[in-house]
Image (cartoon, rainbow, N blue to C red):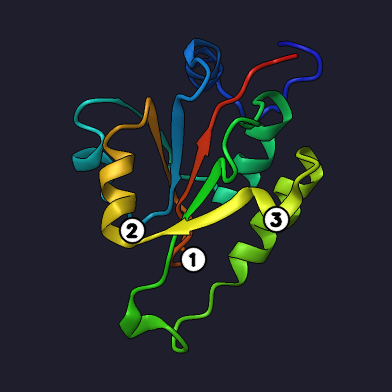
């Protein structure tokens, strides 16, 4: 046991976060995300019993976001056919969590096309597969430096 470390951060996840360097990215994926196929060339950690918000909050307790890029937090934007039909209230939750840990707040959060998100996820250092049931709940974080 360690003091000051959120209990949800397993030894395996802490090791991954520690190994990551400046500009490496980690993807926290919802339950529908094809984590295993996207993660063929990276580390895939399973956290099926947890949702993305609780994992995001815990990671940002120990993980600095990159200050050298405008949007170190990336979400998968809605497909055109889902605009106006699929609500994404979880994005507001993410903005609140990011604001708690980064002075840029929601300005640090950006969106990219679904298929671009998949391409970028394949380049991540790690993909965390969660049990999150919200749709469009995937989030990618780019690591910064500890100052």
Q: Residue drawn 53% across and 79% down? A: 87
Q: Which mark is residue 106?
A: 3
Nearer to us: label 2 or label 3: 3
In the displayed structure image, the side of residue 19 where residue 32 appears, left or right? left
What residue occupies the far bottom of the structure in this picture? 84
Instruction: Pick the quarter of the image with the N terminus.
Output: top right
As helix, strand or loop, the secondary structure at mark 2 comes to loop
**Image point (76%, 39%), residue name:** 102
Residue 30, image x, y percentages: 43, 53
Q: Residue 15, how many percent across, how many down?
A: 51, 12
Query: If you read the primary sequence from the N terminus, does the residue marked by circle 1 or circle 3 appear first?
Result: 3
**Position in image of residue 60 (x %, y %):** 68, 34
Residue under circle 2?
A: 32
Q: Nearer the viewer, residue 123 or 30?
A: 123
Residue 41: give x, y in percent of width and height. Answer: 21, 26
Residue 134, numbered label = 1
Sequence order check, earlier mark of 2 and 3 = 2
For the residues labelled 1 and 3, say whether their Cβ atoms are less than 8 Å apart. Answer: no
């Amino acid at each position: 046991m360690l003091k000051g470390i959120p209990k949800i951060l397993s030894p395996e996840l802490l090791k991954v976060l520690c190994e990551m360097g400046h500009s490496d990215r980690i993807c926290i994926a919802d339950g529908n995300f094809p984590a295993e196929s996207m993660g063929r060339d990276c580390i895939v950690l399973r956290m099926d019993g947890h949702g993305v918000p609780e994992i995001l909050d815990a990671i940002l307790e120990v993980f600095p976001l990159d200050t050298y890029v405008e949007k170190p937090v990336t979400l998968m934007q809605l497909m055109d056919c889902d605009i106006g039909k699929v609500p994404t209230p979880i994005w507001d939750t993410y903005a609140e969590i990011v604001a708690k840990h980064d002075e840029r707040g929601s300005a640090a959060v950006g969106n990219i096309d679904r298929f671009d998100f998949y391409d970028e996820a394949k380049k991540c250092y790690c993909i965390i597969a969660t049990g999150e049931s919200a749709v469009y709940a995937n989030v990618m974080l780019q690591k910064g430096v500890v100052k």
